[in-house]
Amino acid sequence: MTERAKRVLVIGDGSWGTAIANHLAGLGVETTLWSAFHENAQAIEKARENERFLPGFRLEDGLRVSADPHSAAEDAELVISVVPTQFLRSVALRFEDALKGAVPIVSATKGLEIETLRRPTQILRHVLGQRPLCVLTGPSHAEEVARRLPCSVVAASRDAELAARVQATFNSDRFRVYTQSDPAGAELAAALKNVIALAAGICDGIELGDNAKGALLTRGMVEMARFGREQGAKAETFFGLAGIGDLIATCCSKHSRNRAVGEQIGRGRSLQEVLKEMDMVAEGVWTTKALFGPESETVVESLPIAGQVHDVLFSGKDPREAVLDLMRREPSEEMRGVLK
């Protein structure tokens, strides 16, 4: 039977990183939560609460908080990276000399890098070199995990032993972990569902109704799976927890930052106005930009919903016109590009 890791480092003190770290500490794992800023680390340690990103939840007594990469990484058997994608490269560089080459890294980050279109594990590998990597993803809002409500996620890795180790480390009666072997698909699903969540929020904001939202989620799912296949991922990954499970949660939840951003834009506010008021990151915004950025050969025909979201966010397109453009597209076969 695979044993649980005894000492774990969680990099990133946002809401999800804090929830993960507290979950592991509650299971008896010797856990250190790393913050990018000394003042944040000190404030969390003193209050035994992350008042900025996860207020209202007391941290386990055994959870240690640090802002020093070397002391935080000392003797870690497993590292969990929970850094927003657009900051991941710079943070990983801070750990270049702190992490031993053999220490596995689990990525719990959801997004794509704007400049390179790289997935989080690709960024980690590029900065920190070859090492065992795993992806942890699925429908798992930090606020609900912190309340110890039930959730299920996947640990995806080409290294079956590592996936099993992550499963054993995280698994509990409130946090069920499945293993699978398509990390690229899991990461792409995690990134793309945030783009569809923006569209779902826009749908809510302009009050298109339940029929439209049901169609949007379904067609968004097909779009995600089709793009994943084009990138070498397995289509079935998108119809599991990493894909449809997280898509449903993110498109319908009051906790979803991406859905909330889309709703505000649907009500007529600009992206700049909405982001200015946010303390946390809505990854879908930057994933949308990455998909249609300088390193991408993506065309609107391959990602029609994402393409319209991009035009609404970054080109000032009227959301209602975007909806009409989607509805007026040439009729096609439902599962085109997804099923063999």
Image: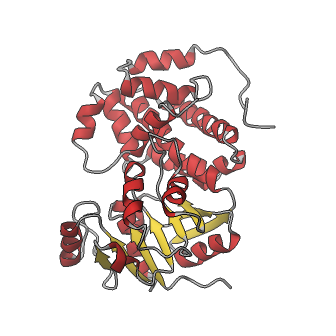
Q: Residue at x 67, y 56 (%)?
A: 182
Q: Residue at x 42, y 61 (%)?
A: 92
Q: How many marks?
A: 0
How far from the left and from the top, in percent, is residue 130?
59, 64
Q: Is residue 109 left or right of 63 when viewed as pictured?
A: right
Above/below status of 145 relative to 117: below
Q: Quadrant of the N terminus?
A: bottom right
Identify the image's colour scheme: rainbow, by chain, secondary structure or one colour. Answer: secondary structure
Q: Nearer the viewer, residue 123 or 217?
A: 123
How far from the left and from the top, in percent, is residue 52?
22, 61
Quarter of the rendering containing residue 114: top left
Q: Quadrant of the C terminus?
A: top right
Question: Quick one: which residue is furthest to the front in this view?
Answer: 97
Q: Is residue 300 left or right of 194 when viewed as pictured?
A: right
How far from the left and from the top, in percent, is residue 323?
48, 20
Above/below status of 283 relative to 163: above
Q: Is residue 38 visible?
A: yes
Above/below status of 173 relative to 231: below
Q: Residue at x 38, y 74 (%)?
A: 22
Q: Is residue 252 left or right of 330 when viewed as pictured?
A: left
Q: Residue at x 60, y 32 (%)?
A: 219
How far from the left and from the top, in percent, is residue 5?
53, 82
Q: Is residue 206 visible?
A: no
